[in-house]
Image (cartoon, coloured by chain):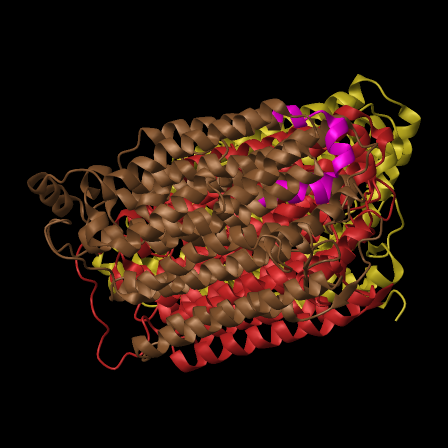
Chain colours: A brown, B red, C yellow
């Protein structure tokens, strides 16, 4: 087991993380015009995206770029090391981040809080990229904790009582989770000493079982908070509606995924498949994942607030990734990784659309969306596309990931899991299609809609009245563009899933490292 | 390798001399400042000049006087002492700058700065004490010299606080004295240069009495519950005093004493057999959690910080009580980590009080807009206490937890985690209010001609200390940074055997 | 040089005595000259004493036979390590006398000055003689000289109550003297000699027995009364508080120590003979010492008059010394012996500082003296140093003694007394904190205080010198220790316990 094969020293992972950090300073800089600031921020994020894509190239060429960031003490050091899974996740983060940023230029109101939003947004982006490229547990922990804490400022951005309550709830959950992760890291360090991620894991097999189990559950519960595993999901449905839409997209698309990504790292790069299986924790994890998928989806059904509904959907969808990890099969894991990427863009699209509706019409609740399809056709089309993808309709990206998940499950004979998968898809249809239906086909009730819309609009939105009563009026292009781009990616990933450099190939590469030849 | 050198005695002497000069000519503002700064720089220079030697393993010693053979005043700058001296002399410099700004126009500044210098003198004396007698000498002197600072305001409230402070610390001092004398009687020596001077043949009851006496004696200043009562009350003192003395010097001297007792009087080997540290560890753990819980309920900023101090000090005690190298490292490094972070907080709180007059958590809504730099510094310090990676606090938490695992005491890890959450629970609301709550009424605008949010003398130490908190978190491995000194110290503690990593 | 200074031994005693007699003559025309004269005499005497101590340090203890008569029939003066006490004693007098010059202005009319200084010189001479005499009869004689001059000193400076206090002092002192005389007679009856070295030799032949025990006990009780240990302390507070402050310093700091030094002398003799079993006696001393510490502190707490409070703390401190003697372990006895001097120094500091304050303001209670430190910073600082020192907090002279006595307690396995000692001292501090608070941290209530000025230099300088010494001897505590250590180690094998 020699993971160092192909390790090359390269500054590029560091640069990918650093570019958005420069953006933090830019956001805070006074005396810049909004326009100039926006273009510099976008440029930086775009640069980061390019680097991330370049890193994918490197990984596909069989290299593993690595850079040592910091040696705090002999035992504590930080290293960035890009493997296939990391590259995949990193590129997703950068891409969705760029889209959300562009979207945010239009969405976030001018004012003193705008600079704060962008500063924290860029910092979160940098840290999430750091999570993606982290080469050892400590680095992972550092970036994970950092973006978790920084997220707080974005959740409470609106500073309404509801937002502040959501923020408090969020930070409480996250801190508890982060502490458990820390405990897990500590225990791992105590047991194994070495912290660098290794495909196949590095925890000693002969360590006391109790300590191994403790470490494992610390990790799972800790990351599970972020990954919104039921019953640790409490913060998700509150935080998402409270946050500004572009951030909801990122939060749901890549940050919740960071939790699942952490579980994945732990199972495959710390514990190792062999030990994971022999510890006997897999069935439990499977059960939790299944419960998460089903409960999340069922709860989503009952939500009247669109963003809440989408938040529950995220809970449910992230369950797939955990489910894949728990099954520990190479095929199913490839599907899981791909799902991570695909879900990011689909959920990003959905939140973008929800944000546009809020922005233009002030409609937050399902009932207020009646007839919006006529008025904002492009937005509604994007929403529909992403919703269908989420359900798993071919040839959209959601179908590809579900397909590989399903095939992988069949490979290892996990019939029950397959049933959960299908049930989840059905439920997804049940909670997403009514939205589409309402937007396109539901009869409008002008009076009620106007009143509700006006009453529920957020501070930033400027509704222009009843959604259906006037002609088509889309949001500005800064916001619509990213929405459509994300939707297009949903389609592209579905159609071109087998192309070189697309998620599927990278996922297979990653799985290879974890499962050996299997 | 011991080298005879006068610097260990000169370092405390410099500020002693400074105190004398301040008392003598301190009515002139210029001379008062001149001597204080001169002494602060000379002292720092002296301590720093010994640092390269310390890292090489050289120990500077200086025997001052001997009363009777084996009993006398002697100085010894070993790694742990150097560590402590370095922290206190550095912070003295910053606190002096801060105090000049803070005490502007206040009464009795001669007395204030004079006793301030005396306190620092004794702190460094404690750091460099070669034996328990010298240690106790400076320890008690510190108690007395702090008193005029505590009662500085001369209000009935301050006098009451002073009385309580003295009652606690003097009774503690009495226990420490009894313990030290007993050590002398049974061991025939008082030196702190060995990894343990007591032998197990003395029998458990005797050793238990000695350990209890010394722990109570030093534990009072270290604020171990239930001996902590004086600390929150002593917060009536002016902020620079609270900052340097009740977050750093006085309380750390207590914690320093407890560690000295564990590592140099008893030694890890003996304590490992005797098991006296187990109850101490439990007590420390209890203190950590209980005082953090109390801190949650405090609305007065300085009192909240005081309870946080109590909690943090027990980290040091806990680290020492675990008797493993990693935990010892944590205990020592936390002396610096807590000091810089807590002093930052006190500075900020003081700056807020001086600039806006607000002293309570509930009054500072939206203050970050008015005092952005200060609140940023406060946030950094808060993150450090929570133990967020890349801050100083994380290093402590990390090594302490590993030390606990090493000692097979996993539930201390749990305590640490709970404590980190509680820390978040009482510090983040402050940050939250400062940044995310709208101001209840508009904050007073800057005075004409002011460029910064508050006086420069207040702001400068805040920024430096906060920056140092970050620096401590990321540069621990750089030689000359506290961590490297701590490692030298830990090696000496575990040189006599015990648990080797 | 060898033995050269031994010749000065009798002159050291004679000089103050003669000086005392000459005082009225010298000051006949100008009464104020008496103070200067006394000072000059004491300066010369202390120069001689320095020579004696130098001799002691170089050649060890030495004797002088008065008139050249051989022992055991002549009068022997002996200068050993315990006698070295005369030097600090004289030096304290040298510091106290200048203080008294201005102080007496308000206390007594000028005509009385010659008498006052004569008594003071007599007192000093008596103490020197007490320390260096080599026979029991002269021990008694010098005790009487000291005692009588002390009564007179109490009475001479005061009005009204002073006479009463002096009378009380006189009565109790007389009882003590009678006991001492009885003991001396008993010893003479038993051994036929009064020379100490000789008595020791003959006692060994006589052996133990109740008669010897009675003599010893009579001495012990007599000296304990002189030291004002707890149950027999009643004479002390009034006398010390009412006397003029310089006299209080002398009485409280030095005269009470007569009892301790006398006890050590008696020990020397009886131990050399090795005829006593002292276990029970030591235990008694320990208990009385401990009780004295606590009771002295306890009474002090209820005083509002600063001088009364200082007087009570003397009882406490005598308790330390007695406790140290009773513990009978090397460190404890060394500590106790050194405290004989250190306490004198500290108490002198306190009484003189208090005297200066009283002199400047005319007030003497805490409640009146609030805020005085602002107007009299140097004197108050000296007072603070003295307070810290008397409680035995480092780094002051008091600490060194406390450390050694406590060390002795643990060394001899009597840990509870170690605790009693340490915490008893803290008990005392309760009161001193009140004093410091009043002086430093409370607003003045009296106009006198608000307008008070720092004391004149002739009063301030002695106070500052003494306070500085309190600090210096805390750090350089080894110097007095090195003097008593050989003597104590010589005695110890016989101490019992």
The answer to which of A189 and B218 lies nearer the viewer is A189
| Quarter residue C54 falls in | bottom right
Q: Which residue is rendered at x = 52% and y = 45% of the image?
A: A257
Mark yes or no: residue C238 visible: no
Residue C322 drawn at (x, y percent) = 66, 35
Please count the marks in the image. 0
Location of the C terminus of chain A by quadrant is: top right
The answer to which of C58 and A86 lies nearer the viewer is A86
| Quarter residue C7 falls in | bottom right
Q: Which residue is rendered at x = 54% and y = 46% of the image?
A: A340
- Asked whether C167 falls inside the magenta stretch, the response is no
Residue A290 drawn at (x, y percent) = 54, 27
Residue C281 drawn at (x, y percent) = 73, 24
Query: Please, what is the dominant secondary structure of the magenta stretch?
Result: helix
The answer to which of A467 and B295 lies nearer the viewer is A467
Q: Is residue B96 left or right of residue B176?
A: left
Q: Which residue is rendered at x = 31% and y = 80% of the image?
A: A31
Residue C432 drawn at (x, y percent) = 44, 45
| C309 versus A52 height, above or below | above
Q: Is residue A434 left or right of residue C6?
A: left
Q: Residue furthest left?
A: A447
| C163 versus A107 height, above or below | above
| B103 versus C162 height, above or below | below
Q: Residue furthest top?
A: C210
Which span of residues is magenta-colored?
A261-284
Q: Which residue is rendered at x = 37% and y = 59% of the image?
A: A484
Mark yes or no: residue A50 visible: yes
| A282 versus C195 height, above or below | above
Q: Is residue A104 left or right of residue C290?
A: left
């Amino acid at each position: 087991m020699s993971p160092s094969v192909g390790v090359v020293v390269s500054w590029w992972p560091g640069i990918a993380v650093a570019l958005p950090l420069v953006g933090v300073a830019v956001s805070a800089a006074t005396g810049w015009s909004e326009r100039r600031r926006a273009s510099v921020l976008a440029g930086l994020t775009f640069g980061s995206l390019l680097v991330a894509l370049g890193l994918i190239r490197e990984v596909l060429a069989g290299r593993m770029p690595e850079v040592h960031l910091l040696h705090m003490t002999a035992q504590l050091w930080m290293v960035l090391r890009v493997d296939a899974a990391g590259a995949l996740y990193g590129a997703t983060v950068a891409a969705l981040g760029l889209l959300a940023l562009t979207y945010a230029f239009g969405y976030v109101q001018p004012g003193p809080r705008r600079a704060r939003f962008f500063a924290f947004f860029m910092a979160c982006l940098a840290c999430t990229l750091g999570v993606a490229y982290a080469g050892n547990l400590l680095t992972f922990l550092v970036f994970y904790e950092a973006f978790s804490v920084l997220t707080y400022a974005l959740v409470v951005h609106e500073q309404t009582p509801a937002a502040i309550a959501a923020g408090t709830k969020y930070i409480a959950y996250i801190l508890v989770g982060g502490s458990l992760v820390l405990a897990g890291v500590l225990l791992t360090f105590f047991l194994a000493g070495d912290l660098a991620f290794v495909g196949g894991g590095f925890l000693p097999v002969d360590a006391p079982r109790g300590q191994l189990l403790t470490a494992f559950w610390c990790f799972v519960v800790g990351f599970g908070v972020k990954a919104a595993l039921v019953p640790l999901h409490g913060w998700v449905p509150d935080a998402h509606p409270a946050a500004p839409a572009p951030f909801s997209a990122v939060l749901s698309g890549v940050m919740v995924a960071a939790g699942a990504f952490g579980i994945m790292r732990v199972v495959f790069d710390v514990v190792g498949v062999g030990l994971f299986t022999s510890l006997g924790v897999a069935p439990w994890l499977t059960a939790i994942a299944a419960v998460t998928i089903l409960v999340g989806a069922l709860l989503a059904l009952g939500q009247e607030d669109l963003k809440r509904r989408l938040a529950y959907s995220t809970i449910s969808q992230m369950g797939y990734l955990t489910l894949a990890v728990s099954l520990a099969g190479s095929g199913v894991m490839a599907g899981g990784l791909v799902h991570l990427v695909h879900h990011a863009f689909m959920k990003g699209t959905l939140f973008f659309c929800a944000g546009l509706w809020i922005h233009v019409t002030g409609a937050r609740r399902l009932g207020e969306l009646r007839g919006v399809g006529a008025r904002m056709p492009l937005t509604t089309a994007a929403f529909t596309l992403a919703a269908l993808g989420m359900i798993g309709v071919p040839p959209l990206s959601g179908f590809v990931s579900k397909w590989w998940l399903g095939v992988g499950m069949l490979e290892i004979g996990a019939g029950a899991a397959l049933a959960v998968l299908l049930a989840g898809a059905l439920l997804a249809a049940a909670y997403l299609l009514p939205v589409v239906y309402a937007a396109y086909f539901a009869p409008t009730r002008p009076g009620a809609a106007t009143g509700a819309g006006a009453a529920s609009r957020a501070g930033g939105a400027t509704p222009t009245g009843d959604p259906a009563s006037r002609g088509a009026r889309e949001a500005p292009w800064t916001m619509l563009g990213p929405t459509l781009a994300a939707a297009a990616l949903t389609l592209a990933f579905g159609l071109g899933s087998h192309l070189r450099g697309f998620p599927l190939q990278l996922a297979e590469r990653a799985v290879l490292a974890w499962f050996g030849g299997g | 390798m011991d080298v005879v050198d006068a610097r260990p005695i000169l370092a405390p002497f410099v500020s002693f001399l400074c105190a004398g000069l301040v008392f003598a000519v301190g009515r002139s503002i210029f001379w008062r400042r001149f001597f204080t700064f001169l002494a602060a720089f000379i002292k720092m220079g002296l301590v720093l000049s010994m640092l390269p030697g310390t890292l090489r393993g050289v120990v500077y010693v200086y025997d001052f006087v001997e009363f009777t053979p084996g009993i006398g005043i002697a100085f010894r700058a070993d790694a742990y002492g150097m560590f402590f001296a370095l922290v206190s002399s550095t912070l003295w410099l910053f606190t002096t700058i801060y105090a000049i700004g803070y005490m502007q126009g206040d009464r009795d500044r001669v007395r204030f700065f004079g006793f301030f210098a005396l306190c620092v003198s004794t702190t460094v004396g404690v750091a460099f004490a070669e034996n328990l007698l010298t240690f106790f000498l400076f320890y008690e002197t510190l108690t007395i010299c702090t008193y005029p600072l505590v009662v500085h305001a001369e209000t009935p409230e301050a006098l009451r606080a002073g009385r309580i402070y003295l009652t606690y610390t003097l009774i503690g001092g009495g226990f420490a004295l009894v313990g030290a004398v007993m050590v002398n009687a049974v061991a025939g020596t008082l030196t702190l240069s060995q990894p343990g001077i007591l032998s197990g043949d003395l029998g458990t009851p005797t050793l238990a009495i000695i350990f209890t006496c010394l722990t109570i004696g030093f534990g009072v200043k270290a604020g171990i519950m239930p001996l902590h009562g004086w600390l929150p009350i002593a917060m009536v003192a002016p902020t620079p005093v609270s900052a340097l003395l009740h977050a750093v010097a006085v309380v750390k001297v207590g914690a320093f004493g407890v560690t000295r007792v564990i590592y140099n009087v008893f030694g890890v080997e003996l304590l490992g057999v005797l098991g006296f540290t187990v109850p101490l560890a439990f007590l420390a753990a209890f203190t950590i959690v209980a005082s953090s819980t109390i801190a949650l309920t405090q609305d007065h900023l300085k009192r909240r910080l005081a309870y946080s101090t109590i909690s943090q000090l027990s980290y040091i005690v806990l680290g020492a009580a675990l008797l493993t190298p990693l935990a010892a490292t944590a205990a020592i490094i936390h002396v610096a980590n807590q000091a810089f972070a807590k002093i930052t907080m006190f500075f900020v709180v003081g700056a807020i009080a001086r600039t806006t007059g607000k002293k309570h958590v509930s009054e500072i809504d939206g203050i970050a807009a008015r005092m952005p730099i200060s609140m940023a510094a406060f946030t950094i310090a808060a993150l450090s206490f929570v133990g967020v990676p890349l801050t100083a606090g994380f290093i402590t938490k990390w090594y302490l937890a590993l030390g606990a695992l090493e000692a097979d005491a996993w539930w201390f890890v749990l305590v640490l985690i709970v404590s980190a959450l509680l820390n978040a629970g009482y510090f983040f609301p402050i940050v939250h209010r400062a940044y995310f709550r709208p101001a209840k009424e508009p904050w007073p605008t800057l005075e004409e001609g002011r460029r910064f949010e508050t006086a420069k003398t207040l702001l400068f130490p805040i920024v430096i200390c906060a920056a140092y908190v970050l620096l401590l978190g990321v540069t621990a491995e750089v030689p000359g940074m506290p961590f490297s000194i701590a490692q030298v110290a830990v090696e000496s503690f575990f040189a006599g055997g015990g648990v080797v990593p | 040089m060898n033995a050269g200074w031994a010749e000065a031994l009798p002159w050291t005693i004679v000089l103050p005595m003669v000086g005392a007699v000459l005082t009225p003559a010298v000051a006949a025309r100008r009464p104020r000259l008496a103070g200067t004269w006394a000072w000059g005499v004491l300066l010369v005497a202390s120069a001689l004493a320095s020579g004696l101590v130098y001799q002691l340090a170089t050649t060890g203890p030495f004797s002088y036979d008065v008139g050249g008569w051989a022992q055991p029939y002549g009068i022997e003066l002996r200068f050993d390590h315990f006698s070295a006490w005369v030097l600090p004693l004289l030096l304290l007098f040298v510091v106290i006398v200048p203080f008294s010059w201005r102080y007496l202005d308000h206390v007594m009319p000028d005509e009385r000055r010659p008498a006052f200084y004569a008594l003071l010189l007599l007192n000093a001479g008596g103490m020197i003689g007490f320390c260096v005499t080599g026979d029991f009869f002269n021990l008694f004689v010098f005790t009487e000289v000291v005692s009588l001059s002390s009564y007179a000193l109490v009475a001479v400076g005061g009005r009204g109550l002073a006479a009463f206090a002096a009378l009380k002092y006189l009565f109790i002192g007389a009882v003590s003297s009678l006991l001492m005389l009885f003991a001396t007679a008993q010893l003479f009856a038993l051994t036929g000699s009064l020379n100490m070295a000789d008595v020791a030799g003959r006692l060994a032949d006589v052996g133990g027995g109740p008669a010897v025990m009675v003599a010893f006990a009579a001495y012990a009780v007599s000296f304990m009364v002189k030291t004002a240990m707890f149950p027999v302390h009643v004479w002390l507070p009034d006398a010390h508080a009412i006397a003029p402050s310089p006299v209080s310093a002398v009485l409280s700091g030095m005269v009470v120590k007569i009892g301790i030094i006398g006890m050590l002398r008696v020990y020397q003799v009886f131990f050399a003979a090795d005829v006593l079993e002292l276990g029970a006696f030591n235990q008694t001393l320990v208990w009385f010492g401990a009780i004295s510490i606590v009771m002295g502190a306890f009474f002090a707490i209820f005083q509002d008059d600063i001088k009364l409070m200082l007087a009570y703390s003397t009882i406490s401190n005598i308790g330390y010394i007695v406790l140290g003697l009773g513990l009978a372990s090397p460190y404890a006895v060394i500590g106790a012996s050194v405290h004989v001097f250190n306490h004198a120094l500290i108490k002198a500091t306190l009484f003189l500082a208090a005297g200066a304050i009283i002199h400047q303001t005319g007030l003497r209670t805490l409640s009146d003296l609030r805020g005085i430190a602002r107007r009299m910073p140097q004197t108050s600082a000296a007072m603070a140093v003295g307070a810290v020192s008397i409680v035995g907090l480092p780094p002051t002279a008091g600490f060194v003694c406390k450390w050694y006595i406590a060390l002795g307690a643990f060394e001899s396995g009597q840990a509870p007394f170690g605790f009693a000692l340490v915490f008893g001292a803290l008990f005392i501090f309760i009161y001193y904190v009140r004093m410091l608070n009043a002086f430093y941290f409370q607003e003045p209530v009296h106009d006198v205080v608000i307008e008070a000025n720092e004391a004149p230099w002739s009063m301030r300088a002695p106070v500052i010198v003494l306070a500085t010494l309190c600090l210096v001897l805390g750090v350089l505590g080894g110097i007095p220790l090195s003097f008593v250590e050989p003597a104590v180690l010589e005695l110890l094998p016989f101490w019992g316990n």
